[in-house]
Image: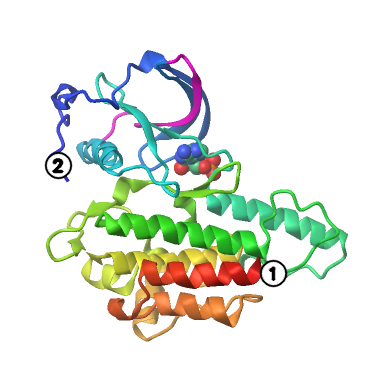
Amino acid sequence: ITAIGGLSSNNSIPADNWEINPSRLIIKSIIGEGAFGLVKKGYYLDSNEEKIEVAIKMMKEHPTMDEMKQFYQEIDIMKSVPKHPQLVSLVACVTRGSSPLIVVEYCAKGDLQTYLRKAWDKLSKIKNEESFAQSSNPQYVSNALYDFSQSDMTDIPQPKDLISFARQIVLGMEYLASLKLIHRDLAARNVLICEDNKVKISDFGLSRDVYYDNVYRKVTGGKVPIRWMALESMTQQIYTTQSDVWSFGILLWEIVTMGSTPYPGVQTQELLPLLRSGFRMERPINCSEELYAIMCNCWNASPLDRPTFAELRVIFDTLLEKVS
Ligand code: ACK
């Protein structure tokens, strides 16, 4: 990562092709809240005066120095990553003036976690209507593989869609890994879905360059996504592409369970001793042995024994061919 300027004086960031005048933006409604503040929907007027649909990430009021630094770091990382279909791409940024903005491409269906949960709710209703027995614990039951061919399935992903989501995430992660970037917060909440069901990895806010030994050690505190973290990240603050693979295994579990929270019934503070003793999440109902084996491999205590993203790509290509 290049040195980040603009912490006390924004003018120390050199203007480049990404920098735009905020008057080129039409800012509309709030679509969510990100790590550093609100995310709003809007339009960017490009040089041809064409309106491009965008998401605009803003900084919350009264940010701390660390938050400012991270916000500028996110801009820097996004600038440095060449466009890829499975990564949310930067459209423009505003770093001059008092309110910095990150302008990214708009993904109409929002984040994968919310999307899956909504689909689960809709499916539960359909299940009721079709007088299927309702699950007593929807947080914990996967319904991903039911066949409801008689119902209106708009925006309810089918098994092949779910496998396709997973495969696309693998493609994006393989690319990030090839750039020696570690995401460090790979989770369904950080994956966005577009109108055409293409998925894109977002929130590079926590991503880091891999230093010489391919390992990043987190030194400062901050909110950490415990339930998505690899064992070595919890115990030694070690983050590598292979710890991203662990998180991918958890993300796969989120997909299969239609957006459940990992380790249901387990308190955060109980998690580390449980994982150390070899405990892993059990196979969700309706999850194939094949998919479950992939998850479990991603949760191998030894990072080198986990599959690489390149290997996962081959696995998911085959899986997708089977379900299509
Ligand atoms: O489910 P959502 O609407 O999708 O809620 C989250 C929220 O902002 C916090 O991340 C939404 N969001 C973030 N980036 C984008 C984007 N590029 N396109 C559409 N929605 C986005 C996300």
Q: Secondary structure at mark 1?
A: loop
Magenta stretch, residue numbers: 48-64
Label 1 environment density (alpha carbons within 10 Å; few <14, some 14–19, many ≥20): some
Q: Secondary structure at mark 2?
A: loop
Q: Position of residue 146 (x, y in %)?
A: 74, 68
Tell me, for residue 2, which label it has, or none: 2
* Front residue of 195 and 12: 195
Contact? badges 2 and 1 (CB < 8 Å):
no
Residue located beneath label 1 in the image: 145
* Front residue of 19 and 64: 19
Q: Hey, which quadrant is residue 275 in on the image? A: bottom left
- Residue 141, visible in the rendered structure: no
Q: Amino acid at mark 2?
A: Thr
Q: Is residue 72 covered in magenta? A: no
Q: Amino acid at mark 1?
A: Leu
* Front residue of 249 and 318: 318
